[in-house]
Image: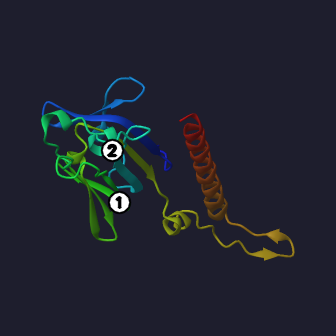
């Protein structure tokens, strides 16, 4: 079962391999990460996502994007740093993640917020994405039967007892997923 609680934080230098695969070289020097492969596991889920350029600390004055852009020696940048050297891409949204080919967007109540990965190539940046829970949908999955009470205690049918047991198992699983998520976040 895929956990309802998931989060990924990718930080490093974005680059294109073979003209199609967006990779990220992590700041810690680890193996390159296929950004789209990571995002694929979030497609169709309600998410909160942030994508942005991440300048050096402290930002380097006189360098494009405060030092996050590696295109400066070429004189032209896909994010437009050659025209606006202080520009820092910062986009995000909360909605359902979707894609078509290499185009990604978040559907925010019918408004499509694009995630412009084409402006990330050759830049130090960060992508943060996490799943969100729709509370009303969540509540629908945990409807418990009405069990009448009388002087002798609850009078439940076997079906009602099965429904309560199933809801208890689902809640136990959900709490376990949330605990794993919190441990993941704590380690990260």
Relative to 181, 45 lies left or right: left
Q: Position of residue 161 (x, y in %)?
A: 67, 60
Relative to 188, 40 lies left or right: left
Secondary structure of residue under mark 1: strand
Relative to 88, 183 lies left or right: right
Quadrant of res 63? top left
Q: Earlier in the sequence, mark 1 or mark 2?
A: 2
Residue at image point 66% right, 61% down? 158
Q: Is residue 2 visible?
A: no
Residue 176 position (above or below residue 154): above
Identify the coloring: rainbow
Q: Crowding at label 2, few (<14), some or many (≥20) Cα neighbours within 10 Å?
A: some
Q: Crowding at label 1, few (<14), some or many (≥20) Cα neighbours within 10 Å?
A: many
- Indicate which disc residue 74 carries: none
In terms of depth relative to the viewer, which is nearer, 97 or 126? 126
Q: Position of residue 51 (x, y in %)?
A: 35, 49
In terms of depth relative to the viewer, which is nearer, 151 or 84? 84
Secondary structure of residue under mark 2: helix
Q: Which residue is mark 2?
A: 39
| Residue lying at the far front of the rendered structure | 62
In terms of depth relative to the viewer, which is nearer, 34 or 50? 50
Q: Position of residue 58 (x, y in %)?
A: 43, 39
Residue at image point 58% right, 52% down? 170
Q: Which residue is mark 1?
A: 96
Quadrant of res 10? top left
Residue at image point 49% right, 50% down? 4
Q: Is residue 148 visible?
A: yes
Relative to 37, 144 lies left or right: right
Q: Position of residue 11 (x, y in %)?
A: 39, 37
């Amino acid at each position: 079962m895929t956990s309802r609680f998931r989060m990924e934080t990718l930080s490093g230098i974005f680059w294109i391999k073979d003209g199609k695969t967006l990779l990220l070289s992590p700041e810690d020097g680890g193996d390159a990460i296929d950004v789209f492969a990571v995002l694929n596991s979030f497609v169709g889920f309600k998410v909160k996502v942030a994508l942005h350029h991440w300048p050096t600390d402290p930002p380097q004055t006189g360098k494009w994007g405060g030092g996050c852009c590696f295109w400066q020696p070429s004189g032209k940048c896909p994010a437009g740093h050659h025209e606006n050297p202080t520009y820092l891409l910062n986009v995000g949204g909360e909605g359902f993640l979707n894609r078509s080919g290499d185009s990604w967007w978040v559907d925010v109540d019918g408004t499509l917020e694009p995630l412009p990965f084409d402006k990330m190539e050759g830049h130090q940046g960060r992508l943060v994405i996490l799943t969100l829970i729709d509370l009303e949908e969540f509540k629908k999955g945990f409807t418990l039967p009405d069990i009448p009470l009388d002087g002798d205690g609850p009078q439940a049918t076997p079906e009602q007892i099965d429904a309560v047991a199933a809801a208890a198992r689902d809640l136990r699983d959900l709490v376990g997923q949330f605990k794993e998520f919190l441990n993941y976040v704590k380690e990260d």
